[in-house]
Every structure is written in C-alpha cells, then in structure tokens.
Image (cartoon, helix red, strand yellow):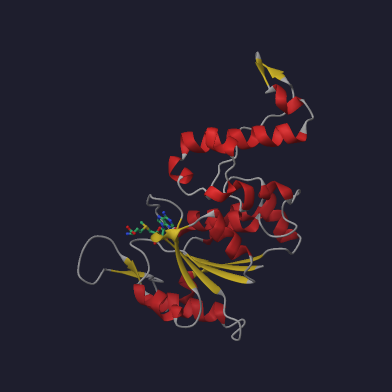
C-alpha cells in the first residue's frame, strides 16, 4: 500500500520509522512519503493560512497550497487517483471497520489540517475527482491532524497482510468483524501463573479450548457492558446465544 502524508510538520511522523509500521516500510509492504505543504507556497514567508471569511478567531488554511500539493501528489498516477483522507473532529468517526476498509485501498493521501482547518473548497474540489473521507478520531479537539493521521496509519497498517506476526491476533481484537464485532476484548494474562498473590483464572490453565473460548466471550461481554454500554445495543441479536444473554 502506498501512503502520502501532507503536513506543515512532517517531522511529527518520526514514529512511523519504528516498530510494526517501520518494519512494514522496510519490507516494502507500506510505502509512506511525507510532504511539506509549504513547498507549494510562493511567498517569502511560505504562508499557508489566512483570516477566516465572516470573521471569528483563528486562521484557516489557504486553498492554493493545498490544491497544488494534492495535484502534484495525485499526478503520480493520473488514471487511478488516491483516496483522500482529511482528519477533522467534525468528520465521521474512525472505527476498526473503516480501518479495514481503508486497508484494502492501494493508495491513500492524508491531508493534515492545522489552525481552524482547511478551506472547505479543497474538499469540495477533490470530491469531484476522487473519494474523499473527512474522518474524526474522537470527540475532542487536537491542535493538528498529524496525531490523528499517526493513529489512522497505525490502525490501517497493522491490518495489511504480513504486518502482524500472527495474522489471527487482529481477528481477536476488540471491534474485529465476526465474533468480536462490537465487543471489547476481555482481560489477558501470561506467565507466571501467580503474581503478588493473584492467580491467573484456572480455566485458562485447563487446556480445554471450548471452555477457554466461552470464558473469553463471557469476559468480553462483561467488559463491554461495563465500559461501553453503547456498544451493547449494537450487538447483532442473531449472534447472541442463551449464555450471552445471561452474562
Ligand atoms: N475548528 C475545528 C473544529 O472545531 O472542528 C478544529 C480545528 S483543530 C484545532 C485543527 C486540526 O486538527 C483539524 O483541522 C484536524 O486536522 C485536526 N484535528 C483536531 N481534532 C481532531 C480529531 N478529533 N480527529 C481528527 N482530526 C482532528
């Protein structure tokens, strides 16, 4: 998968050199290119923002550098334009489902806003040429899109074939499609079997796969009820058995 990221702070993306994503880049699974938005400005101050029409506090990112930057990046393959992802708190929520959908794309471009965001005409313009998603990573406001893009690239990148050591681990994650859809993963344990007087639940040491699977599902349900009751209402009733309903 190819990813281009446009930002006025490309140095924010140093973490993409390490760990799973760094290794995926080394192995050629992920091809990430960072771009400095100011390279598409033409004044001595390399200006990317201006005051908002209609008044109000803050500054807005100017359309001209964004237009030139996006045109230049997309020109690398004019016949197959990239899908454009614009982080914004006012976008649709970033979910595991969307991460999975985006992980199937061959090419993504992320446009990192700053200040009060990017002039809305940029999104309108590119929506006539390609798929554009305005996406929020949570109900809070960050100073810029860079951290949101780090979050999204990591969530998308770990779903690419060959990135995780064990492909099955994504299938058991919270929010994964299938058995865990809209469920949080329950608690996990490793050796030693006892630590500071606290024992690992005996069922996990039993070697009985069926009982372990049932215990994990019970714990996932309990945790979801406790921490995310909003998700419980979204569970597909057809996937719930009698025991699920008792938990
Ligand atoms: N005035 C905007 C609003 O209230 O919707 C917030 C602008 S914010 C200070 C600057 C930039 O940070 C946004 O353009 C966006 O790129 C990014 N950002 C902030 N919070 C975000 C979130 N929850 N999800 C995704 N991007 C976010």
From the viewer's perspective, is 75 left or right of 117? Answer: right
| Residue 14 horizontal/vertical position (percent) | 59, 54
From the viewer's perspective, is 93 left or right of 236? Answer: left
From the viewer's perspective, is 69 left or right of 119? Answer: right
Q: Nearer the viewer, residue 174 or 218?
A: 218
Is 82 above or below relative to 103?
below
Work out which quarter of the rendered image holds the N terminus and state it. bottom right
- Dividing the picture into quadrants, the one containing residue 163 is bottom right
Q: Residue furthest left?
A: 55
Q: Residue furthest right?
A: 207
Q: Residue furthest top?
A: 197
Residue at 56 percent of width and 54 percent of height:
96
Residue at 61 percent of width and 86 percent of height:
79
| Residue 227 horizontal/vertical position (percent) | 47, 36
Residue at 74 percent of width and 35 percent of height:
210
Is 52 above or below relative to 238?
below
Q: Nearer the viewer, residue 199 or 110?
A: 199
Q: Is residue 247 visible?
A: no
Ligand 1 shows up in the quarter that is bottom left
Work out which quarter of the rendered image holds the C terminus and state it. top right
- Dividing the picture into quadrants, the one containing residue 123 is bottom left
Q: Is residue 149 visible?
A: yes
| Residue 43 horizontal/vertical position (percent) | 39, 77
| Residue 82 horizontal/vertical position (percent) | 57, 75
Residue at 39 percent of width and 70 percent of height:
48
Q: Nearer the viewer, residue 176 or 1?
A: 176
Q: Residue furthest front?
A: 242
């Amino acid at each position: 998968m190819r990813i281009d990221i446009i930002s006025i702070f490309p140095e924010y993306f140093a973490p993409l050199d390490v760990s799973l994503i760094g290794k995926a880049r080394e192995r050629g699974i992920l091809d990430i290119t960072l771009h400095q938005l100011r390279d598409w400005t033409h004044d001595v101050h390399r200006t990317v923002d201006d005051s908002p029409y209609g008044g109000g506090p803050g500054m807005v990112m100017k359309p001209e550098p964004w237009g030139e930057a996006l045109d230049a990046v997309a020109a690398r393959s004019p016949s197959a334009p990239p899908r454009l992802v614009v982080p914004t708190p006012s976008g649709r929520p970033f979910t595991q489902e969307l991460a999975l959908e985006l992980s199937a794309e061959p090419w993504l471009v992320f446009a990192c806003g700053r200040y009060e965001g990017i002039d809305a005409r940029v999104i309108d313009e590119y929506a006539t040429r390609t798929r554009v998603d305005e996406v929020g990573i949570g109900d809070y406001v960050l100073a810029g899109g860079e951290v949101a893009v780090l979050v999204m690239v990591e969530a998308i990148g770990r779903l690419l074939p060959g990135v995780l050591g064990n492909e099955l681990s994504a299938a058991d994650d919270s929010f994964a499609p299938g058995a865990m859809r809209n469920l949080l993963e329950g608690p996990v344990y490793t050796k030693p079997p006892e630590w500071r007087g606290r024992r690992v639940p005996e069922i996990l040491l039993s070697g009985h796969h069926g009982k372990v699977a049932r215990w994990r599902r019970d714990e996932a349900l309990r945790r979801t009820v406790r921490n995310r009751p909003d998700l419980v209402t979204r569970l597909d009733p057809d996937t719930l058995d009698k025991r699920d309903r008792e938990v």
